[in-house]
Image (cartoon, coloured by chain):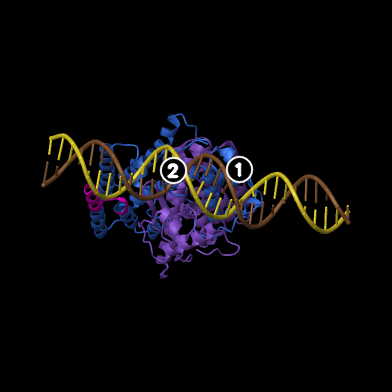
Chain colours: A blue, B purple, C brown, D yellow
Amino acid sequence: MQKIAGQTMVQTVQEALRRQIQDGQYEPGARLPSEAQLTQDFDVSRTVIREAIAALRADGLVEARQGAGVFVQVPAETTGLPFQNLDFQLISSMVELLELRTAVETEAAALAAQRRSPAQEEVLIAALGAVQQAAESGAPTMEADFALHLAIANATNNPRFAEFLTMIGPNVIPRRALADSSAESVSQDYILGIQAEHEAIVSAILDRDEDAAREAMRTHLKGSQKRYRSLLRDAARKGMPLS
Amino acid sequence: MQKIAGQTMVQTVQEALRRQIQDGQYEPGARLPSEAQLTQDFDVSRTVIREAIAALRADGLVEARQGAGVFVQVPAETTGLPFQNLDFQLISSMVELLELRTAVETEAAALAAQRRSPAQEEVLIAALGAVQQAAESGAPTMEADFALHLAIANATNNPRFAEFLTMIGPNVIPRRALADSSAESVSQDYILGIQAEHEAIVSAILDRDEDAAREAMRTHLKGSQKRYRSLLRDAARKGMPLS
DNA sequence: ATATATCAACCTGTATGACAGATTTAACAA
DNA sequence: TTGTTAAATCTGTCATACAGGTTGATATAT
């Protein structure tokens, strides 16, 4: 089992086992291979296997019985909240969520361009300034970043957009994972580039240019997707297959 | 830390930590004690602590950063199921939801055009046929209609899209609300028109034409929005208050 | 005085070996 | 054939060691 950049082996194994279960390789009630067998299958230590299984157990996917084995649980009725089996440190989870976010926020930007009120314009400008200020002072920008995106959703004057964004929450772009491959100067370039993208979005909204707003937001979030995907590609280029 | 009968020490520690976080002992962003400290606090081995933290991490409560520590995540808004203050008799509520759906499903159609597998093509064609069959036999088309949209979401091969649609799904458009103002012949025209729109979507997806798929889905759902808005106008013309 | 580099201390991630307790399977006796 | 016991196999926990990453203090350069 090959290591994926920015991701622990526990997460890699956890996700692989989760996928095997969801793909039906192990039906509900079936017994997983023993820990000893899994250490060989995945070529990792027993510690990694145990921690991965602890994670699956916490999510209710498996049940471990001492002496007997680890068994796949009958899935609980999924009447609850969606997006609850996400591990925000998994790159693939982030890319998936980002694709969904891109769909929603692209349209939100266009609706905001059509519908925002003068008061909402003011909130947008203040939120943009707050991100910039955080960036310049070297403070974490995640909160200010999310507040700007939420202000755009609010400017649609359709509460469902803000409701969706609130549901997903601000844990969507861990900043470190995106900046991790660079020297500090590149990270600064990255922050400046993000800020330029934010400015283009807000500018198009203020101009009531719905198509430009849609395109600017798409560019911004496709850029984030691209940066995440490059993490995966970097790992592949280093000769590590991503099975 | 005392062992509880029938429960592993991992589970005991995991629950204790979860409770501490939820009780506010550690605020979002705060750092938990180190693993070494927690082994002392709970009088268990580091293995138990690590497995407990792996469980909390899988549930999104904490994030571990190598060398820095384990940090409490900002909770995703856990106010329960979103979209709960909707009154489905209110046309404006349906329009709001439809706008959000339009954002997501427009992008889903484009991704499905890029990514669908031959097996998923087969599912799409079958789902399209099922809607047509239901329409011809005068049966309700709502279920078949939803199944088609879900098949498209599945063909994105990003589970978040299907997850979103499943969440929204029970709130799908009640057909009666759209048909209620018409004679039977008009209702038939309406159904035929919807079917043509469905065919255009599936056709673009099978053709791998992402832009056409996006446009066909947008047209389809914008059409639904338009039809809902005309209900608003009709009601206003008849002097009926809409609250 | 300020900025930068270095290093030690501390942290999480992983591997390994050992032992405890529970379950399952195989062997043996009645 | 059935019941009992032992052996094998399994998960749960502990301890130790090393690797790699982060942080803060200290030394050095400007």
What amino acid is at disc 2? Answer: Ile
Q: Which residues are magenta?
A: A128-143
Q: Nearer the viewer, residue A8 or A155?
A: A8
Q: Main secondary structure of the magenta part?
A: helix
The C terminus of chain B sits in image quarter: bottom left
Name the secondary structure under disc 1.
Answer: helix
Above or below, B188 relative to B15: above
Q: Is residue A131 magenta?
A: yes
Task: State the residue in front, B129 or A117.
Answer: A117
Measuring from the top left, give residue B101's x and y in whole percent.
Answer: 45, 53
Query: Do discs 1 and 2 share a chain?
Result: yes
Nearer to us: label 1 or label 2? 1
The residue that label 2 is drawn on is: A91
The earlier-in-sequence mark between 1 and 2 is 1
Of the pair A77 and B95, the residue shown nearer to us: A77
Residue at (47%, 54%) from the top-left corner? B53
The amino acid type found where label 1 is placed reads: Ala
Q: Which residue is mark 1?
A: A36
Q: CA distance from mark 1 to mark 2?
A: 28 Å
Q: Is residue A177 visible?
A: yes
